[in-house]
Amino acid sequence: MSQPNQPKAFPVSWDQFHRDARALAWRLAGQGHWDAIVAITRGGLVPAAIVARELDIRLIETVCVASYHDYKSQGELKVMKGVSEDVIKLGGGEGAGVLIVDDLVDTGKTAKVVREMMPKAHMATVYAKPMGRPLVDTFITEVSQDTWIYFPWDMGLTFQPPIRDGAA
Ligand SMILES: O=P(O)(O)OC[C@H]1O[C@H](OP(=O)(O)OP(=O)(O)O)[C@H](O)[C@@H]1O
Ligand code: HPA
Ligand SMILES: [Mg+2]
């Protein structure tokens, strides 16, 4: 289940993800008001929907970034769609009043590219690893750098052999 270069696994159920994303919304609610959310696709779409519902934010934009092209290694980072100028200018420019949402920050590469587009925006993720943590303003749970987070939309139920049959 773990990635070859990340020996520890942190599987997250839908239930757990919903709880953690809602906890993120609670934390954000005490920190101000946002005019819009920019969701970093695709992983950021799910927490963005939950945070938008909790904070009653109706203006949702996407920034389409892909950094991992397979399940084994980090590929080139590609920005496939940027953020509209209208959203960047909302709170006076440079992303002021904008909340950027992603599922997690790992190396921080994705967050860095998006932050450069909106230096005054607030960056929020549900999970964070130590390398990327300095790039995030608000997050809920930190896991170690050698942990791979398994999101519920990437998983399915599988049969588990009984322990007495030799399961590890
Ligand atoms: O901090 P980093 O090392 O840049 O990694 C974090 C990013 O990697 C994953 O996205 P990915 O590009 O795999 O695409 P996805 O959201 O479509 O799964 C994750 O959803 C973050 O956006
Ligand atoms: O730990 C992770 N889990 C899922 N996707 C990711 N993309 C970067 N790091 C991770
Ligand atoms: Mg992503």
Image (cartoon, rainbow, N blue to C red):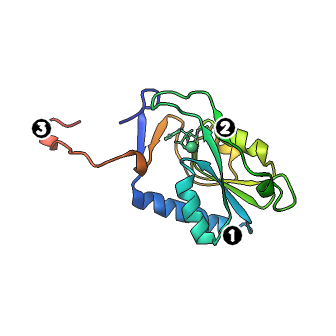
Give the CA separation, mark 3 to mark 1: 51 Å
Q: Position of residue 69 (x, y in %)?
A: 52, 31
Q: Position of residue 121 (x, y in %)?
A: 76, 54
Dot placed on the residue nearer the N-terminal end, 2 or 1: 1
**Which structural element holds mark 3?**
helix
Q: Position of residue 91 (x, y in %)?
A: 83, 62
Nearest the viewer among 93 and 134 is 93
Q: Where is residue 55 in the image (x, y as percent from the top left)?
A: 63, 70
Q: Which of marks 2 and 1 is in front?
A: 2
Q: Which of marks 2 and 3 is in front?
A: 2
Dot placed on the residue nearer the N-terminal end, 2 or 3: 2
Category of crowding for the residue at label 2, using alpha-carbon neighbours closer than 10 angstroms: few (below 14), some (14–19), many (at least 20): some
Identified at 71% across, 62% down, the residue is 36
Q: Is residue 79 above or below residue 42?
A: above
Q: Mark 2 points at which residue?
A: 79
Q: Name the residue under label 1.
A: 30
The quarter of the picture where the N terminus appears is top left
**Looking at the picture, which amino acid does disc 3 mark?**
Asp
Dot placed on the residue nearer the N-terminal end, 3 or 1: 1
**Which structural element holds mark 1?**
loop
Identified at 66% across, 64% down, the residue is 28
Identified at 66% across, 69% down, the residue is 29
Q: Mark 3 points at which residue?
A: 165
Category of crowding for the residue at label 1, using alpha-carbon neighbours closer than 10 angstroms: few (below 14), some (14–19), many (at least 20): few
**Looking at the picture, which amino acid does disc 1 mark?**
Gly
* View extreme (right): residue: 92
Identified at 32% across, 48% down, the residue is 156
